[in-house]
Image (cartoon, rainbow, N blue to C red):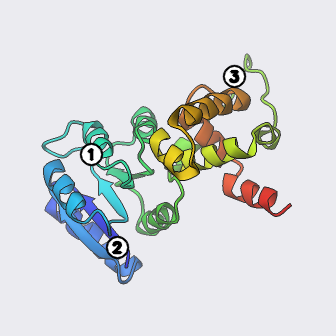
Amino acid sequence: MTTLMVADDHPLFREAIAAVIAAGLPGCRLLEADSLAQAMHEAQRHEASLDLLLLDLGLPDAAGLDGLARLRDALPDLPVAILSAEQDRRTVLEAIELGAVGYIPKSTPRDDLLAALDRILEGHLYLPPQVMRRPPPTRHDSPPAPLDDRLTRLTKKQLEVLEALGHGASNKGIARKLGIAETTVKTHVSAILRRLGVTSRIQAVLLAGELDLAAYLASRRGR
């Protein structure tokens, strides 16, 4: 059974989300919290069975992304997605940099919300379409190499690290999953950024998302 938690201080919104999830994800168990303190308490109680925590950025005891940072520190293995009215691109990207596995605006239509939840529960990163669209290049920008060519520059291990980054994993989580040292993960991340021609983890994830990294990896593994 899939277990989700919604952490939001507005009872009517929690009730609406519960109705959408009940109709679109039959059999899903839904937990609720109206503060960060309650969310952390309930998440620790249900840590073994909790699949995803949907976190609002406007909780009364957490300012902005502070709640996400505190959750990641206390429960680094718990997938957390942001469900917020805030749609500023910088806020969205900062949330992903902090380890969120998705960012869903509260204005998202019902069917798109369910599709986003499905994607996150399948282990993929979800970002709003307006964030995934990259700004058009200026006349001063040099044309980048085709994305497929840039991915071929990565080693097998670097591709695995990039895939884990796309799932919102921290360096520590990647190290544990791949059975390597955390310092080795940092080395791989630096090499990934350099070979993809980007300057941050989230830029690497967004760039890889343009191709569908999962499909690319599947094609390599099938060779």
C-alpha gap between disc 2 and disc 1: 26 Å
Please identify the quarter of the rendering in which residue 124 is found: bottom right
Decide which of 207, 171 is in the foreground and name it.
171
Q: Amino acid at mark 1?
A: Ala
Q: Is residue 167 above or below residue 11?
A: above
Mark 1 or mark 3, whichever is nearer to me: 1
Q: Amino acid at mark 3?
A: Thr
Q: What's the mark number on residue 21?
A: 2
Instruction: Characterize the local packing of mark 1: few (<14), some (14-19) or many (20 or more) Cα atoms within 10 angstroms.
Output: few
Q: Residue at x 22, y 44 (%)?
A: 58
Residue 35 shows up from this direction: yes
Q: Residue at x 36, y 53 (%)?
A: 80
Please identify the quarter of the rendering in which residue 135 is found: top right
Mark 1 = which residue? Answer: 74
Instruction: Characterize the local packing of mark 2: few (<14), some (14-19) or many (20 or more) Cα atoms within 10 angstroms.
Output: many
Decide which of 10, 163 is in the foreground and name it.
163
Q: Is residue 54 above or below residue 175?
A: below
Instruction: Characterize the local packing of mark 3: few (<14), some (14-19) or many (20 or more) Cα atoms within 10 angstroms.
Output: few
Provide residue 75's location: percent of width, then percent of height. Answer: 30, 50
SS assignment at label 3: loop
Mark 3 = which residue? Answer: 138
Provide residue 180's location: percent of width, then percent of height. Answer: 57, 43
183 lies left or right of 157: left
